[in-house]
Each structure stands twice: as structure tokens, then as C-alpha cells.
């Protein structure tokens, strides 16, 4: 498939359009492709810019990947958060209560972008939804047609977006839209815009991040790199305590506990965990050449691997992959998978029958009459339907919650049969509105019965199916098969994590009966992510199961667990190729983005050749040798070491290093490789003024010291410049401050391990007068 819509449809355009010509061409091509795919380009909207019922684009159907999560392109309204930020900043006098559609041109851009990225570039609906949100925010802030947008408009949109969304996710999406889409196709008059945008937006974000780190408490040199990407210590161990020691209080929480355990064991992405297949465990046996088990001759008898569907593999279909399970996690992982299979078995049986029949209640005939209480449980999943349940009912429920064994729910129907008063929720379900919509309550002979009370009355199964299809579509199971990368279908009941649809167990406080509930769905990412904390208005695992008030407000990012396992594997000396394979990466470079080891841990993992050990001896010399081998430091000693090693061999180079290793110094701002055996450095702690021996590091403490120093020098320079012109010493102070400030800024931008001033002077040499013959 070609790289873009423009490439497919050339430069032809609709003469009736009066927009930027390149913009016109792109929109025309997208419209043509959309209509070929059965989509109506002109989407009718209501006054707020939301598509009218049955007119939104079904992106999930367009992708045709069979996944259950609905995804519709239906919102083309102004961004409410953008209007609010514009109003609060005094940038525009607007009524934030009035939301209108964005212009037709912006609507065309949103739709054309969706077509380009789904049908041509093969992106996911989730990406399109994020992009549409970013487009609407920019359209609201710019308040002009898209091709007239300038860099200032985008920069303002990013700044306002970051105010209402501190994570900065939307501004990152905005910048990426220009780098990979708008500038590439030259859709706006002012293109290219990305260089102007990123130099302002990314630069300001970098400064903010550095300042926030510098303001933090003092840390040790052993701190890990980019530690903020790892799980917070207290949150991590509290989450471990919850999922391994607490008893889940709901059926859905029992599934979530299992998901968290699998995340901890595997380091998979949360999307890969929720879409695990039912037959996810694979065992491989090993034999020797004579057919004997390898375990009998000192090897390993078998190994376990986890079959899963890897994300970010360049396809919207399910891409099958396997991951080896370390022996230390094997038993616990198998127990976890077995528990999930047991919990979801009743749901799986219902879903399989629904897929085979295409009906909502395949366990009945359409002509069957079912008790109103039983149909209520089928639709809502609620196992208790009487008012004021007695002790026997509560005990049965409690026994079920202890082990989540559905057999404990078996006596509930009989225990509730004698009660005459039903729960108000049952009466509300069969109210006059539902009856007029087709949910007719009947007597035992099948005749409509509108008399008072529901005990003993029945519902025709056909009526219930039609009512749910028309009035409660969110309670209908997902029956479409998922699509594998090889084109084969995968039935939804063959997925591991199934859950009851549209059931709020926390609100009702009553357990779901998985034997009866008819609405079954495949788990989605939000099923777990929303309860890991940080989501407003949603109870998290921490708030429900946390021990203390401090524990209840904790949160954790699921992806940080992937960073943690990646780092631990590096720390344990696992090869980067093995780590990359484990996490379905195509390059080892990606794995190092997840490497957060401290410098001490990296040095500990590096093993020098055995022949070197006899010569080196000293621990300090070994440290310097390791830094040189890792390429983490530069300087005259390093250059001389490599020259001697190349010309005279390892032995001579190591003897030189032993003699000069005292030249390795860890300063507050970086490494210094120079020998001060005879005289101390005359520029001690001022190496940032241009000394060639200074080498940058990525140690957090060095970084913080540099940032603090930068701030102090900047304040001193501003104070000097504020003095009246002609003041005594003013010009010298300004020159002194600028020299040091420029040196510190150069240090801040130097790659770790590289010399900051490779062509700079040797400031360790005393500043003595030199004759005119110097250097001859």
C-alpha cells in the first residue's frame, strides 16, 4: 500500500473547495477512500458537534480486528478544556457553557487523518481518538482554519494543554502530528512547523523537569537513571501485598488481582495481559540424543512459556508471540492461570453458546417463560434479589467470597424462594417504562399481567431478548471473532480474561453470579488501569485494600512494572539480546531505554578479562578500567591508554593505567581524568570554566549540582547586569558570570561520557608567563 492518500490519488481536487490546494488534495483523496470503504463523509451533527445516532464512524469495524472495545469517531465539538483555559487566561472573552462544532475544514481534517492512519498506515483506533482530541483542542485555541495555523498557535495550544493535563500527553501527540503528518504532507501554509514548535515546547519541558529534580531531596550516587519511570517503592510493595495476601471483595477484583500478578511475573504490557488467550501456557520437553529426559542426565526436563499477543508489531491484528517463564515464577503463574480459568468457566460456557446460536439467551427457547427474578439475574448478574436477606443468604454469599467457588451460590435460589418481598431494584427493572418498551410481565399461563407485585410472575424469553437488543445494547456480549495476524479468526470465548458487562459490583455490594449473567465481554485495558490509582472518581485497589490512609491514596503505572523487570534483568547480567527477545523488541537499543541501573550496578556487571586482574590489583584502577571499557569517560589518560593499548598491547597499557589511575576523580559536576600527584588543581571545582579534563556523567547527583549551579550563576549575572552602567567592577563581573554560565550550559548539553571541552586548555597547569619561544 502506498505511503499516503495523496500518493494514491494524485493532485486532483474538487473545484468547489476553496482551501489550501495541498490540503484540498489530501481531503479529496481521503473522502474518496472513505466512500469506497462504505463510509458517508458528511456526518450530521447536533448543536454541540456530536454525531447523531447511527451516523458516527465505527472505527473498530473499519479496522476489522474483531476486538471488543467500541471505538467511534463521533465528536467534532470545540474542546471544553481549551475554552476554559482560554477564558481563565483572559485570552478570549467566551461563554464556556456554549460548546459548538469546530469548522467544516477542521472536521474534514479530523476525518481525513483517521482515514489516512487506519486504512493507509494501519494505526489503531485508540491512536485516532487521541489525535482527534488533540485536533479539537488546537482548533479551539487557534480559532482559524487549519491551513492558517502558525507555530505560535501550536505552542499556545501545548502550553494551555499542559496546564489542564499535567502529564503532557496531549501536547506530545500534537507535536507528533506535525512531525509525522502535517509537515510531511505540507498541509498547512506555514510548514514546516515542527522545528519551531519543538524548540520551544520541548525546551521548556526539559527545563521544568530538571528544575523539579534539582528541588528534590539530596540522594546518593547509586541512584538509578530516570528513576521516575520505575514504580514508586511504597506503591509497588503495597500492590504486591494486596494481590498476594488480601482476599478480593468482588469477582472483577479477583480477575484484576490475577492480572497484576501476571504483570509482575512477565513484564508484559497491560494490553498484552488482558488479551491473553485461554490456551496461553506452553510446555516444551527436552531429551538427549538417546531419547532420555534431559532432567535425568543433569539438564532441564521441560520449560514453560506464555503464549500472548504482542503489541507494537506493525499490525492491528493479533500478533502471536511467546515468552519464556523463569522457573522461579512457574508454579505461581500456573496457579494464577488455573484460577482465572476456573473463575471464568461459567462465563465462557455462556459466551460459547451465544457465539454458536447468535442469541442473547441460548439456554432457553424463545417461547419459554422464565421467572422475573431469574431473568433479572440473567441481565444484571445480581445473585441476591430479595429485600432484607436473612442470615442464611448472607452466609452463602460470604462463603462464595472466600473461595469464589460458584458451587457456593447453588443454594441461593432455594434460600430466597420463600421471601415475599423483592428488592426495589427488581421493581425498578420491570417498571412501567420497561413494560411499555416490550418487557411484558406475564402470569404462569403466559398472559400479560399488570397486577401489583412480581412474585411468581414470568417473562417471555423472546420479549426479553428484543427488549435488551433495543434498550440495553451495552448488556449484549461481544460475539465477533478477533483476527489473528495470519488472517484466521479467534472466537471471543477462547480468551482468558472474560468479565460480566455493565455490572457495578462495588455499587450494589452484592456478588455477581457468573452462572447466570448473560452479558459477557473480553477484558480491556481500562478494566485494570483505572483501578491502579490516579483516576478521579474511581475506586482503586489501593483505596479499597490499602492498610493506612497514606496507602489508600497511592497509585502506580502498569508500564512501570515493565521498566522494573527490564532493569532487573540487566542487573542480573542477562544479555541484552535475550531481554529484547523476551519483550518482543526488534532492536536491543529499545531495551536500553528501559535500563535504569545505577552506575555502580553497571560497573558491577562488567567483567574485565582475567589476564587484567593480575596487573590491575587496585579496586580504583579496576573502576577506571571499567569506565574506559564502557565508554563512560574521556580525557588525556583515556586517550593515552588506548594509544598504548593499540601500539604496545594490553600489558603496557594496564601498567600505564596503574601508574596514572590516581588521576580519576569524581567531582560534584562530572569526572576528571588528570593526575594531581605533585600539585593540587588550581581550578578545583571550577573545571566547568573550560578544562579539557572534565567529562560529563549521567549521575543524578552530578546533574542536580549542575542545575543548581546554573541557577545561581544566572541570578548572579542578572544582579550584575542590573547595576548602573559605569559601576566599579560591573563589566568584569558580567564577563566573569557569562564565561562560567556558558561553560555550565555546555556541560548540561554534553553526552554522558564525553569530554565537555575537548579542545579546551589544561587548567591544571599553573598560569605562568610563557616566552615567545613557547611551542617551538
Image (spheres, grey):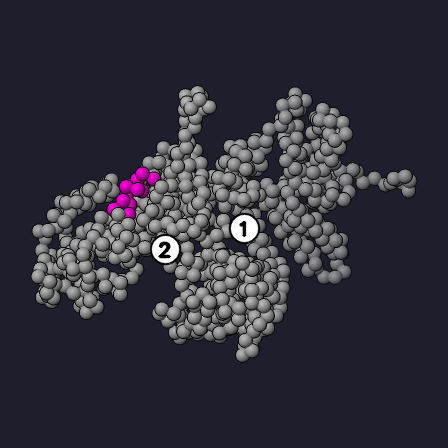
Which of the image's four quarters has the N terminus?
bottom right
Q: Examine the structure image and report whether residue 759 is included in the region drawn in magenta.
A: no
Asked whether the viewer can see residue 80, the reply is no
- Rendering coords of residue 191 (x, y %): 62, 66
Image location of residue 8, percent across then percent down: 56, 64
In the image, taking residue 775 as reference, residue 585 lies left or right, namely left
Q: Is residue 762 above or below residue 624?
A: below
Q: Position of residue 224 (x, y in %)?
A: 54, 40
Disc marking residue 387: none
Residue 564 screen position, x and y as percent:
47, 40
**Which residue position is annotated with label 1?**
212
Residue underneath mark 2: 68
Boundaries of the magenta span: 337-348
Residue at image point 51% right, 73% down: 105
Q: Mark 1 or mark 2: name the one nearer the start of the chain.
A: 2
Q: Secondary structure at mark 2?
A: loop
Q: Main secondary structure of the magenta part?
A: helix
Looking at the image, residue 439 sits to the left or right of residue 570; the answer is: left
Residue drawn at x 77%, y 40% is 762
Amino acid at each position: 500500500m502506498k505511503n499516503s492518500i495523496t500518493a494514491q490519488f494524485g493532485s486532483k481536487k474538487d473545484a468547489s473547495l476553496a482551501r489550501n490546494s495541498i490540503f484540498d488534495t489530501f481531503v479529496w483523496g481521503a473522502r474518496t477512500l472513505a466512500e469506497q470503504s462504505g463510509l458517508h463523509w458528511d456526518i450530521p451533527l447536533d448543536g454541540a458537534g456530536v454525531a447523531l445516532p447511527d451516523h458516527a464512524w465505527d472505527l473498530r469495524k473499519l479496522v476489522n480486528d474483531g476486538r471488543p472495545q467500541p471505538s467511534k469517531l463521533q465528536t467534532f465539538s470545540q474542546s471544553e478544556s481549551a475554552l476554559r483555559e482560554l477564558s481563565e487566561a483572559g485570552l478570549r472573552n467566551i461563554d464556556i457553557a456554549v460548546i459548538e462544532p469546530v469548522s467544516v475544514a477542521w472536521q474534514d481534517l479530523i476525518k481525513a487523518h483517521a482515514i489516512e492512519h487506519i486504512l493507509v498506515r494501519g494505526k489503531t483506533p485508540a491512536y485516532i481518538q487521541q489525535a482527534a482530541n488533540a485536533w479539537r483542542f488546537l482548533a479551539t485555541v487557534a480559532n482559524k482554519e487549519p491551513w492558517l495555523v502558525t507555530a505560535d498557535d501550536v505552542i499556545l495550544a501545548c502550553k494551555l494543554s499542559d496546564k489542564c493535563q499535567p502529564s503532557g500527553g496531549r501536547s506530545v501527540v500534537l507535536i507528533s502530528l506535525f512531525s509525522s503528518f502535517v509537515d510531511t504532507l505540507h498541509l498547512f501554509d506555514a510548514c514546516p512547523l515542527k522545528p519551531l514548535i519543538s524548540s520551544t515546547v520541548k525546551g521548556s519541558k526539559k527545563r521544568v523537569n530538571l528544575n523539579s529534580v534539582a528541588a528534590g531531596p539530596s540522594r546518593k550516587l547509586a541512584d538509578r537513571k530516570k528513576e521516575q519511570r520505575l514504580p514508586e517503592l511504597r506503591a509497588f510493595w503495597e500492590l504486591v501485598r494486596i494481590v498476594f495476601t488480601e482476599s478480593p471483595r468482588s469477582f472483577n477484583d479477583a480477575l484484576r488481582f490475577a492480572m497484576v500478578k501476571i504483570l509482575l511475573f512477565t513484564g508484559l504490557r497491560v494490553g498484552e495481559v488482558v488479551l491473553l488467550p485461554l490456551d496461553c501456557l506452553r510446555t516444551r520437553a527436552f531429551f538427549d540424543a538417546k531419547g532420555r529426559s534431559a532432567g535425568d542426565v543433569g539438564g532441564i526436563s521441560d520449560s514453560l512459556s506464555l503464549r500472548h499477543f504482542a503489541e507494537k508489531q506493525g499490525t492491528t491484528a493479533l500478533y502471536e508471540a511467546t515468552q519464556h517463564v523463569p522457573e522461579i515464577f512457574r508454579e505461581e503463574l500456573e496457579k494464577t492461570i488455573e484460577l482465572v480459568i476456573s473463575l471464568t468457566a461459567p462465563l465462557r460456557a455462556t459466551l460459547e453458546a451465544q457465539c454458536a446460536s447468535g442469541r442473547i439467551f441460548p439456554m432457553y427457547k424463545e417461547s419459554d417463560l422464565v421467572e422475573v427474578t431469574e431473568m433479572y439475574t440473567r441481565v444484571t448478574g445480581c445473585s441476591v434479589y430479595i429485600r432484607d436477606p436473612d442470615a442464611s443468604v448472607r452466609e452463602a454469599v460470604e462463603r462464595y467470597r472466600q473461595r469464589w467457588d460458584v458451587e457456593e451460590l447453588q443454594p441461593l435460589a432455594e434460600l430466597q424462594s420463600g421471601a415475599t418481598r423483592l428488592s426495589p431494584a427488581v421493581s425498578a427493572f420491570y417498571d412501567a417504562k420497561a413494560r411499555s418498551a416490550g418487557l411484558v410481565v406475564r402470569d404462569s399461563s403466559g398472559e400479560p399481567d399488570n397486577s401489583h407485585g412480581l412474585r411468581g410472575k414470568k417473562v417471555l424469553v423472546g420479549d426479553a431478548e428484543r427488549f435488551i437488543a433495543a434498550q440495553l445494547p451495552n448488556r449484549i456480549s461481544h460475539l465477533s471473532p478477533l483476527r489473528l495476524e495470519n488472517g484466521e479468526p479467534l472466537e471471543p470465548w477462547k480468551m482468558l480474561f472474560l468479565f460480566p458487562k455493565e455490572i457495578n459490583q462495588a455499587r450494589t455490594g452484592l456478588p455477581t453470579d457468573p452462572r447466570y449473567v448473560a452479558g459477557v465481554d473480553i477484558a480491556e485495558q481500562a478494566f485494570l488501569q483505572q483501578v491502579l490509582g490516579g483516576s478521579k472518581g474511581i475506586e482503586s485497589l489501593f483505596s479499597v485494600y490499602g492498610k493506612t490512609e497514606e496507602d489508600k491514596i497511592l497509585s502506580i503505572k502498569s508500564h512501570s512494572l515493565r521498566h522494573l523487570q527490564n532493569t532487573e534483568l540487566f542487573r542480573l547480567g542477562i544479555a541484552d539480546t535475550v531481554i529484547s527477545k523476551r519483550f518482543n523488541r526488534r532492536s536491543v537499543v529499545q531495551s536500553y531505554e528501559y535500563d535504569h541501573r545505577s552506575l555502580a550496578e553497571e560497573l558491577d556487571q562488567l567483567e574485565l578479562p582475567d589476564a587484567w586482574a593480575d596487573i590491575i590489583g587496585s579496586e580504583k584502577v579496576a573502576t577506571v578500567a571499567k569506565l574506559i571499557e564502557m565508554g563512560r569517560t574521556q580525557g588525556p589518560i583515556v586517550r593515552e591508554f588506548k594509544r598504548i593499548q593499540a601500539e604496545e598491547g594490553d600489558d603496557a597499557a594496564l601498567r600505564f593505567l596503574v601508574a596514572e589511575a590516581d588521576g580519576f576523580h569524581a567531582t560534584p559536576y562530572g569526572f576528571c581524568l588528570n593526575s594531581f600527584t605533585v600539585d593540587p588543581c588550581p581550578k578545583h571545582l571550577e573545571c566547568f570554566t573550560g578544562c579539557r579534563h572534565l567529562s560529563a556523567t549521567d549521575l543524578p547527583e552530578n546533574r542536580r549540582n549542575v542545575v543548581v549551579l546554573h541557577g545561581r550563576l544566572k541570578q548572579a549575572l542578572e544582579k550584575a547586569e542590573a547595576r548602573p552602567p559605569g559601576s566599579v567592577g560591573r563589566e568584569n563581573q558580567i564577563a566573569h558570570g557569562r564565561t562560567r554560565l556558558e561553560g555550565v550550559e555546555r556541560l548540561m548539553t554534553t553526552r554522558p561520557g564525553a569530554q565537555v571541552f575537548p579542545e579546551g586548555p589544561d587548567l591544571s597547569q599553573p598560569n605562568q608567563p610563557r616566552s615567545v619561544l613557547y611551542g617551538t
